[in-house]
Image (cartoon, grey):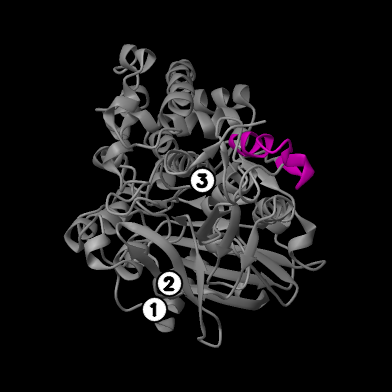
Amino acid sequence: MSCGRGIAYRVDRQYPYFHHLKKAVIIGSGFAGLSVACFMAKAGLDTTVLEKQDMPGGRARKLAADGFVFDMGPSWYWMPEVFERFFSFFDKKVADYYQLDRLDPSYRIYWPDCRMDIPADYTALRKLFESIEAGSAGRLDQFMMEAEYKYKVGINKLVYKPGLSLTEFLDMDLLKGIFKLDVFTSMKEHIGKYFKNIRLRQLMEFPTLFLGALAEDTPALYSLMNYADIKLGTWYPQGGMYKVVEGMYSLAKELGVKFLFDMDVSEIKVADRKANGVVAKDPWLEEHFYDADVVIGAADYHYLEMNLLPKKSRTYSKEYWDSRVMAPSCLLYFVGLNRKLKDIRHHSLFFDTDFNEHGKEIYRTGKWPEDPLFYVCTASVTDRTVATAGNENLFFLIPVATGLQGDTEELRETYFQKILTRFEEKTGQSVRDAIIYKKTYSVSNFLNDYNSFKGNAYGLANTLRQTAILKPSCRSNKIKNVFFTGQLTVPGPGVPPSLISGEVVAREALKYLNNHSTPLKSG
C-alpha cells in the first residue's frame, strides 16, 4: 500500500504505518541475536545481522571435522515450551525445523563410590529418592509443588519483563506470592530444609550450575530450574543443538533477514545521542557502513559498550563491569573415538570429587581448579549423525573461573589427562588408545572468538544483586536507539532465556520506533 511519500509498512498490529522502511542492524547471531532478528523482521523492519564468525550461532556454533560433528556451546535442551512459544509467534512449530526426543534417563551422575541414573519418569524418581533417604519422596513432592509455582509465576510474571523499572513488578500476583517465591532465601538453605543426604542435595543444587553461581549465592526462586529439570525434562534435538540454530536461521531468512558473516563490527556511529549506523570490517579489513534506525547488540555487552561506543556514550564504567559476578568460563575438549563405548549415557556429570571446593575455586578464589568436577556429553549414543558408524563423539567440559591467566595447551593437556583417567576408572573402559580426533577450547578462545568479558562462557551470574532491574539494562541510558540482548542482560544466562531476551528487547526497540516515527493513518 502506498500513501503519501514512499511505501507504508505495518510494523505489527499494535504499531502504526511509517513513512519509510525502518532499518535494524543487529550485532551477533547467537540465540538472542537470531531471536530478536526474527521479531524485528516480522514487525516489518529491514533487518541486517552482522556476525564475526563464518556461520550463525555465536557460542552455539558447530564443529565438523573428520566425520564428527560437535556442538561447541550449549548441549542441554530444557524448557521446551519456550522454544515452542518462540516458533508459534511466526505460525511455526518446533517440528517444522527439527525432531525433539526426551532423554530417559535424563542424565547420569558419577559419585565417588557409585553412579546414579536420573529417570525421566517422576514416579521412578520418587522411588530413587526414597531408597536413598527415608521420607524424601514426600518431601520431593512438596519441593516440586513450590518449584512449579515459582516456575509458572517466574515465566509468566518475571522473565518477560525488560527490567527497566520497579513499576514493572507491581503485579498483584507477584505481591501476594512474594514470600512463596523465596527471593531472599538461598538455594542451598532452601534445599537443605527438604533433604539431608549429601547426594540428593547436590543433585538438587546441580541446576544452579546453569545460572552461574554457588547455591548459597543463588536465590531460592531458582528452584524453578528443578521443575524444568525434573518435570519438563531433558530433551535432545536430533542432529544436535545446532539444529535449533539452523531452524532459527532458516526462519529468519524466510522473514527476510539479511546475514553478513565474517564481519567484525568496529564502531557504532553516534551523533546527538543517537546511533546512525554501524561500521564493520570484512575479512580483507575493508570497512563497510550500515545505516540504522535502531542498533541492537546481541554480542558481548561489555565489549560493545567499552570498545564500540565513545566514552561519553557508555552507560557503565570499567569499575562497574569489574564489580560484576560472572558465570564460569570453561575448558572444553571435543574428542572423537574410533570405537563405541559400553553403557554410556548421553549426559554424564562427574561429581566424584569435592563439589564445594570446586565451586569455591570458580567463584571465591578464582584459580585453576585442583581436582575439578566435569561433564561429558556423548551425543552419539542418541544420534547416529554426529559420528561415523562405529565411532563415538565425546564432549568434555570443566567449569573454570573467569579472568584466568595461563591458558596454554600444556595446561589444557594436563587437565585432559586428569579427567580422562577418572572417566576411564568410572566407566571401566579404556579411551586413550581410541582417540582419533581432539580439539581444545577455553578462556583465550572465548576472548578471541566472542570478545567475551573475562573469557566467560555463560554470561552474568544470577545472584540476587544481579536480577531483573539490577542487571545491565537492555536499553542504553545514553543513546536513544541502542539496545542490548543476550546473557549479560535480562533475563539471564541459558538458551531459553536468550530466546526470551530477543523477544523482550524487540518489543522495547519497536516501542522506541513507534514513539519516534511519523505515523500514517491506515486506509
Q: Are marks 2 and 1 in contact (CB under 8 Å)?
A: yes
| Residue 338 image-quadrant placement | bottom right
Height in image: 27 above or below 193? below
Callout 1 secondary element:
helix
74 displayed left or right of 478: right
Cα distance, mark 2 to mark 1?
Answer: 6 Å
Cα distance, mark 3 to mark 1?
Answer: 37 Å
Residue placed under numbered mark 2 in the picture: 415
Q: Which residues are magenta?
A: 82-101
Asked whether residue 300 appears in the rendered view, the answer is: no
91 displayed left or right of 195: right
Q: Are marks 3 and 1 in contact (CB under 8 Å)?
A: no
Callout 2 secondary element:
helix
Percent of width and height locating residue 138: 47, 15
Type of the residue with mark 3:
Gly
521 displayed left or right of 218: right
Percent of width and height locating residue 92: 74, 38
Percent of width and height locating residue 370: 32, 65
Cα distance, mark 3 to mark 2?
Answer: 36 Å
Residue placed under numbered mark 3 in the picture: 502
Q: Residue at x 34, y 43 (%)?
A: 462
